[in-house]
Image (cartoon, helix red, strand yellow):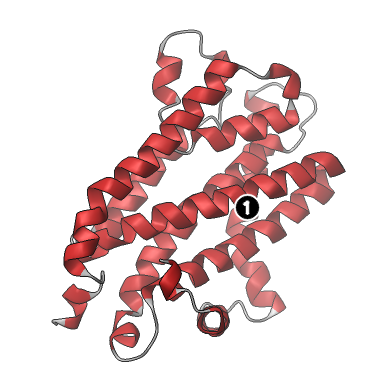
Amino acid sequence: MIKDFNLVQINRFTSLLLTLQKKDNLIGFIIGLVPILVTGFSIELFIGKVIGGEIHTDGIKGVCALFFIFFSNSISQSTISIKNYSSIIKNSYLQPMTVMLSEILLQYLTFIIAFLIFILVFNISFIKCILLIILSFLLFIYTLALTNSLLVLTSILEDFGRILSIIFQMLFWVSPILYSIRSIKTELVYMFMTNPFYIFFELIYLINSPESFDHNFFWWGFSSSLIFLITIYLLLREYRKKNNCIFIKYSNN
């Protein structure tokens, strides 16, 4: 992955993606932000106040939603871009790594802008903001590593994009965005924590409420995420070696 890193190429292709997605101007970028902000504010205000019965909302439920949206969009959009631009990759020096990283960078930029809006609206403290930004960068690295392992499946499964969308819908509903993991009083709580994304929810919760640190929750979440990443890498490593490039299928068409 590192050997395919080309900063100039990534910069140029990211700019191209901004143009192709009509986000290279202020109005276009704002329009792209709307679905993310609507989802985040809806979860924070509706779930937090109406269902949760909370008088005051602190923005944390919405922030959890923003983190998940960045995670899911980065992987799904990278997969779509790989297929959309496969012909360009075949006929140029454009690397798969460039397409993937450019898409994730674009999603991260969108996340940061949406997060800054949440900071202003909910008056999130400076310390929490810094910690959440650091956490978002760790999520960026985790997402990059996972996406790099998963993209080989685009050459194996025709409907991989659709499969991903179903998986992310399931993960959204079982993730502690709409509920608190600490409200589950049965052993089923550990099943919910097998979610490979759970550790980031736990860390967001701890940044907001450090006094509620639970060793079991933290290490279970950390272990499940790490084991999932390693397992995916090992399972798909041989496919990557055999294909040598995940676009070999397209180059034969």
Instruction: Please give the name of the residue rendered at 40% of the width and 66% of the height, measured from the top-left corner.
Output: 1
Instruction: Please give the name of the residue rendered at 54% of the width and 29% of the height, measured from the top-left corner.
Output: 176
| Amino acid type at mark 1 | Phe
Where residue 233 sits in the image (x, y, percent)? 32, 49
In the visual, does 241 lie left or right of 195? left
Nearest to the observer: residue 103 or residue 35: 103
In the visual, does 155 lie left or right of 171? left
Q: Quadrant of the C terminus?
A: bottom left
Instruction: Please give the name of the residue rendered at 20% of the width and 75% of the height, measured from the top-left corner.
Output: 248
Nearest to the observer: residue 66 or residue 52: 66
**Residue 56 sits above or below residue 21 on the image:** above
Q: Which residue is mark 1?
A: 137
Where residue 64 sits in the image (x, y, percent)? 61, 40
Element carrying mark 1: helix
In the visual, does 127 lie left or right of 250? right
Where residue 93 sits in the image (x, y, percent)? 38, 88
The answer to whether one can see residue 99 in this image is no
Nearest to the observer: residue 124 or residue 178: 124
Q: How many marks?
A: 1
